[in-house]
Amino acid sequence: GIQVEQSPPDLILQEGANSTLRCNFSDSVNNLQWFHQNPWGQLINLFYIPSGTKQNGRLSATTVATERYSLLYISSSQTTDSGVYFCAEDNYGQNFVFGPGTRLSVLP
Amino acid sequence: ETGVTQSPTHLIKTRGQQVTLRCSSQSGHNTVSWYQQALGQGPQFIFQYYREEENGRGNFPPRFSGLQFPNYSSELNVNALELDDSALYLCASSRSMNTEAFFGQGTRLTVV
């Protein structure tokens, strides 16, 4: 099945800084999603982005399906952005395979 | 439109017992998937139900079983609980296979 890698594993930022999180895939990208897991464990949908670029406020994402990677950009980070960010790819329509996550800490 | 809801939110069970977790899918969604997330790791796929039929299963033993009901809500049952079953259990629903998935808030299971 598909393998998903995420980098960096950990990231510490000062409030107001920008960051880029990366997701690499071992196979073709068909149904990619980015999530933010809050401290209570809920996975919050950020982007459904099989290809192209999307923006939502301070967050944007780009997926280059032909090169099997996706990037999540966070601009002007806030303390509420802290948490774990996961990318996940659909495994041939059956289930999502998650990366190991990037743990982001935004300091005031 | 209500989101995905799971119950209970927290649960403590004794090794060897059985547990049932519940998930109400989002309105209009016919596909439900269950995931187990151990501390510090990404969610791992348990199984998926599509229109009341199991549509795929991850690397979990048979003591993990499930159901999907005609209203597309779902249950996850775990028999003969082991200490390693302690985890956050997440349910996701989607309009169909190969479409955007939405997750519930999870059930945190502790086995003692």
Image (tube, rainbow, N blue to C red):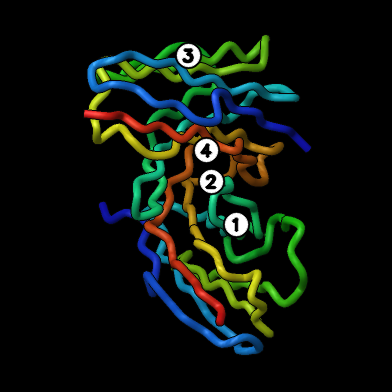
Give the CA distance from mark 3 to mark 1: 30 Å
**Taking B71 as reference, is A14 above or below it?**
above
Disc 2, disc 1: CB below 8 Å?
Answer: yes
Q: Is residue B36 left or right of residue B54?
A: left
Residue B57 on image: x %, y %: 72, 58
Q: Which label lies toward us, 4 or 3? A: 3
Q: Amino acid at mark 2?
A: Ser
Chain designation of label 4: B
Residue B96, disc: 2
Residue A62, disc: 3
> Which sits in the foreground, A87 or B76?
A87
**For the point 65% across and 64% down, which residue is it?**
B53
Disc 3, disc 1: CB below 8 Å?
Answer: no
**For the point 66% across and 88% down, which residue is it?**
B16
On the image, numbered disc 1 is attached to which residue?
B50
Disc 2, disc 4: CB below 8 Å?
Answer: yes
On the image, numbered disc 4 is attached to which residue?
B99
Disc 2, disc 3: CB below 8 Å?
Answer: no
Give the CA distance from mark 1 to mark 4: 12 Å
Query: Mark 3 falls on what kind of element?
Result: strand
Give the CA distance from mark 4 to mark 3: 18 Å
